[in-house]
Image: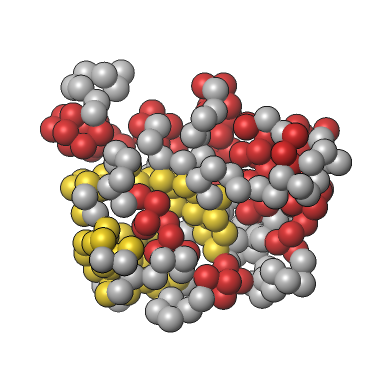
Amino acid sequence: MSEATRVAPLLSVRGIHTYYGDSYVLQGLDLELAEGAIVAILGRNGMGKTTLIRSVAGLTPPREGEIAFKGKSLRGRPAYAIAQDGMAIVPQGRRIFRSLTVRENLLLPTSALAGRRGAGPRNGQRRWDLAGVLAEFPQLAERIGHLGGALSGGEQQMLAIGRALMANPDLILMDEPSEGLAPRLVRQAGEIMKRLRAQGHAILLVEQNLALALEVADHLYVISSGQFVFRGTPAELGRETEVLDRHLGVAAGKLA
């Protein structure tokens, strides 16, 4: 495809450098994410995965480099404004409001305080409302009046995803959605992500579960000490035995 006809990515990250105080975490990362695609970020703990999510969301802005969302620079924009423009986050640890009911948690993104300004669905995306989210997650419908703190870990993860969907985002940032889940619920999370992609949502996924990432992602990046050491398709990663062993702790032949 020529440069003139190339479709602009939904999310573009160019040479970002992010710090926590004097700690130099992200060291010149480049990344692209197309509409309706899933990109997964893999790596060991402490390598910069969550910092990348926070940089994109505007929670820990990079000191250098450029992040563009829907063709517009995010430089200097506060996190709430980025969210209002069509980005939602499913944070590590779920971070639901434990003292609010399931219904109240889900309705937060539709409140006047949230101030979501986005237009209608893009490119065939589904338009989410409370009834649609509860149909997608029937376990939540059964517990609609329960407090968030009374839910199981898997139900809290569904609630965190459902809350993000209620904002009708163009891009969903998911930080370790399989963390602490039983294998059955990990598989369910994967099916949910694939359905969201089919409905037109893009997902930037941070994940330590290699099997899940390989199953759902269109492209993968492996991060080590704040730099990408691999980028490519799941099939290409499967052939990179050194990357798997050194940076992900997976011995050759263990992916089958």
Q: Give the image location of residue 141, x and y in percent.
A: 81, 38
The residue positioned 31% from the left and 52% from the top of the image is 48
Left/right of residue 162 with respect to residue 52 in the rendered view: right
Q: Give the image location of residue 145, x and y in percent.
A: 86, 41
> What is the quadrant of the C terminus in the image?
top left
State which quadrant residue 195 falls in: top right
Decide: is 60 above or below 117. above
Q: Give the image location of residue 45, x and y in percent.
A: 32, 40
Residue 166 seen in the figure: yes
Residue 239 seen in the figure: no
Give the camera-side residue of 144 and 32. 144
Q: Residue furthest right?
A: 145
Left/right of residue 89 with respect to residue 5 in the rendered view: right
Q: Residue furthest left?
A: 242
Left/right of residue 145 with respect to residue 200 in the rendered view: right
Decide: is 147 above or below 68. above
The residue positioned 56% from the left and 34% from the top of the image is 189
Left/right of residue 132 with respect to residue 57 in the rendered view: right
The residue positioned 65% from the left and 60% from the top of the image is 168
Decide: is 141 above or below 120. above
> What is the quadrant of the N terminus in the image?
bottom left
Q: Residue furthest bottom?
A: 76
Q: Give the image location of residue 42, x and y in percent.
A: 32, 42
